[in-house]
Amino acid sequence: MTTTVLLVDDHPVVRSGLRTVLDTDTVHVVGEAATGEEAIILTGHLRPEVVLCDLRLGEGINGIQTTAALRGLDPAPAVLILTTFDRDADILGAIEAGAAGYLLKDVAPEVIIEGIHRAKAGDMVLSPELATRVLEGVRNPLPKLTDREIDVLRLLATGATNKQIAKALFVTEATVKSHTAHIFTKLDVDTRSRAIHLAQQVGIL
């Protein structure tokens, strides 16, 4: 039984290499996308059973956001993340978005092919090490931000100053500083840039 696959990666060389090693008797690559937005459109047209998606996709939505959008389609493909990034927040974010698994790009082609078939069958595809880390993350998840903290974080992501954020939200600068401090504590970061980066990776932004 052949499994149809859509490749999603912003590097043409990577997509070409993956197509070469994956297009076999049991896997058929039906298309390629360079962005998450393109992946969503192509999935609607091509109806792949599995989407093999990178985590970082350049401009536009990232792999986690793409996964969530793809899983909301009808029919929804299984989404398997294939990336070089193995941060816990990335892994948990992908799983929470509905990914069927998470593989690193340094695995053998046979592992990717097996993962594709397992994802199609509805199995969770994770190496033992990553599975352990996901379990730990589920036991100790990132604290949830309040709606107002998310509002502040979104404005921080635009480069707005505390004064500008205060004006936009009709609060005092002291209140903005308080919200920012709570955000930093909850996300376990110490700078705006790290807070924004982490929030983007786990799908908060």
Image (spheres, rainbow, N blue to C red):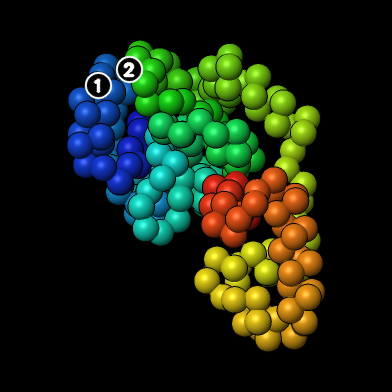
Amino acid type at image mark 2 = Pro
Question: Which residue is denoted by mark 2 in the rendering?
Answer: 109
User: To which quarter of the image does residue 193 belong?
Assistant: bottom right
Coordinates of residue 161 in the picture (x, y in percent): 59, 76
**Residue 138 vs residue 176, the one in the foreground:** 176
Amino acid type at image mark 1 = Val
User: Taking the image as drawn, is residue 116 in sight?
Assistant: no
Image-based side of 67 in relation to 150, left or right: left
**Which residue is depicted at the point 58% across and 17% down?**
129
- Name above or below for residue 51 compared with residue 43: above
**Residue 71 vs residue 109, the one in the foreground:** 109
Residues at badges 2 and 1 in contact (C-beta under 8 Å)?
A: yes
Coordinates of residue 196 in the picture (x, y in percent): 57, 57
- Name above or below for residue 7 compared with residue 200: above
- Number of other residues with Cα within 10 Å of mark 2, as a class: few under 14, some 14 to 19, many 20 or more: few
Question: Which residue is denoted by mark 1 in the rendering?
Answer: 21
